[in-house]
DNA sequence: TTGTTATATCGCAATATTACGATAATAAAG
DNA sequence: CTTTATTATCGTAATATTGCGATATAACAA
């Protein structure tokens, strides 16, 4: 075995888990913070910034992209990413209500 | 290879990642929600509620415990868990400021 | 003590993640 | 077209996670 049984849970629970999975690696947290500071992202900057290999950064970026958090545009010869603000707000609200609901109901 | 290079990142980034990792499975999201609704948790209830085996639930509970989110007390012959509210608020604030800071700086 | 019930841990198999070198693809520059 | 720079993908090795049956542990009941 070893396959997550996601079909046992509702879609909100699965969505929280899916977003959390992306945030569950410090490199991806750092990448998101860096992109938001720069209002853009050049992959080679991230390589320098983090000390990870270029291939690794690229993989992390594609994990973040998978859940729709990145918008990419070309700027000169570098691929320029920026955070999809709508999507970010959606997830922010999702987590906020998750955290708050449990706080309210809690012992 | 295959070991996360957490030493490359700061402690806040690692803490966010660590908490996110716990939330990165729908079973654990469901368990937290269930415990907060019941203001207690009986492991066998979770087995029924989720459809996972008892051993699996117990493992998920110990992941949640690891980051200090559960307080356990004996109540009759059942182990009764409840969420550590202080710790929950700490993490809630951590995520809230992470989400908000990026929103503000974002494109 | 013995039996019952609830939870934790062990051991294992299946799968997923992480990291990186090598290499391919893409686009600007000459 | 060729070169150069940047990013993506492939292949692979190391490690981590997930799930469950089997078994151990703990507490109450009789």
Image: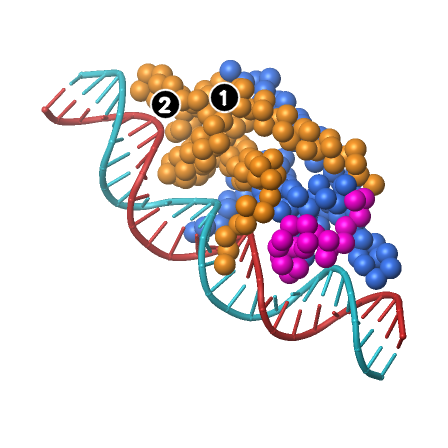
Chain colours: A orange, B blue, C cyan, D red
Residue of label 2: A79
Span shown in magenta = B38-57
SS category of the residue bearing label 1: loop
Q: Can you tell which mark lies on residue A95?
A: none
Q: Is residue A59 above or below residue B99?
A: below
From the viewer's perspective, is the residue at label 2 or at label 1 nearer?
1
Residue at left 40%, top 28%? A43
Q: Is residue B75 left or right of residue A54?
A: right
Q: Which of marks 2 and 1 is nearer the N terminus?
A: 2
How many C-alpha atoms fall within 10 Å of the one at disc 2: few (<14), some, or many (≥20)? some
Residue C11, image x, y percentages? 55, 70
Residue of label 1: A84
Residue at left 56%, top 24%? A88
C-alpha distance separating marks 2 and 1: 15 Å
Residue B18, image x, y percentages? 61, 42
Q: Is residue A105 left or right of residue D29?
A: left
Q: Is residue A38 above or below residue A12?
A: above
SS category of the residue bearing label 2: strand
Residue at left 60%, top 40%? A10
Q: Name the chief secondary structure element in magenta.
A: helix
């Amino acid at each position: 075995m070893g396959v997550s049984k996601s079909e046992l849970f509702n879609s909100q629970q699965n969505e929280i888990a899916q977003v959390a999975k992306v945030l569950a690696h410090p490199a991806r947290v750092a990448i998101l913070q860096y992109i938001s500071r720069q209002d853009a992202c050049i992959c080679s900057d991230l390589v320098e910034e983090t000390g990870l290999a270029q291939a690794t950064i690229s993989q992390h970026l594609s994990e973040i992209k998978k859940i729709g958090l990145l918008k990419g545009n070309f700027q000169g010869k570098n691929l320029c990413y920026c955070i999809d603000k709508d999507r970010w707000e959606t997830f922010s609200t999702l987590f906020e209500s998750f955290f708050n609901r449990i706080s309210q109901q809690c012992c």
